[in-house]
Image: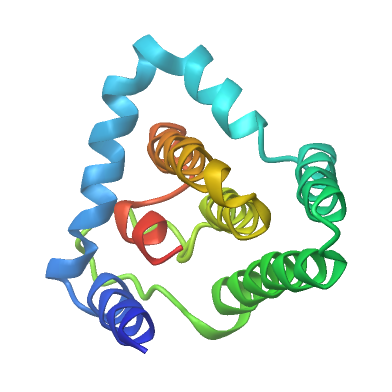
Amino acid sequence: MTCLVLTALIAHLALATAPGQVDTILMEGTMRSARHYEGFSMLITGLVSVPVMVIAGAAVALVAAARRRPTLAGRALGAVIGANITTQILKDYILTRPNLGVTTGAGNSLPSGHTTVAVTISLALVVVAPKLSRSPSAWLGWAWTALMGVSVMMEGWHRPADVITA
């Protein structure tokens, strides 16, 4: 419930208020300094593609199957699919970013689909991992999600609020 309230608050501030639209300025600043790391950010953002998502989903299912927990795999992958569908519905149909004359007026990109994919697959892996592997899985997932968040900002695809709400 706290996450929902915070997400709604961040979305409102970032989309509907002039001070909140400073996140576009932050994204543009990140883009300017990103020229030195372009190959790295392209590599990271390239990791979120349909084939990689299928492979990661299969890995989650295999871990659950190896643990003889097929219903756990179904719930974990269902959460991944549900979160990503919700992200696309929010971004494309519900949330809008009016041009308040503060920044470039780029369209809405909140929440970040790339970051949602990274975080949900990471969480699914933690859910299905054996007890001793959960901590390393969480750290790996945190690193991938953090790198994804920074990379999509460096590429100019998303603002900080987009990444945080994802």
Q: Position of residue 128 (x, y in %)?
A: 68, 57
In percent of the image, x 35 and y 77: which residue is there? Answer: 7
In depth, the one of 102 and 94 nearer the eye is: 94
In percent of the image, x 43 and y 39: which residue is there? Answer: 139
Q: Quadrant of the N terminus?
A: bottom left
Q: Position of residue 41 (x, y in %)?
A: 49, 24
In percent of the image, x 40 and y 14: which residue is there? Answer: 37
Q: Is residue 32 above or below residue 58?
A: above
User: What's the image's color scheme?
Assistant: rainbow
Labels in figure, total: 0
In depth, the one of 12 and 83 nearer the eye is: 83
Q: Position of residue 166 (x, y in %)?
A: 46, 63
In percent of the image, x 22 and y 76: which residue is there? Answer: 13
In depth, the one of 151 and 59 nearer the eye is: 59
Q: Position of residue 88 (x, y in %)?
A: 64, 70
In depth, the one of 116 and 91 nearer the eye is: 116
Q: Is residue 103 above or below residue 55?
A: below
Left or right: residue 87 compared with residue 48: left
Q: Is residue 34 above or below residue 113?
A: above
Left or right: residue 19 compared with residue 54: left
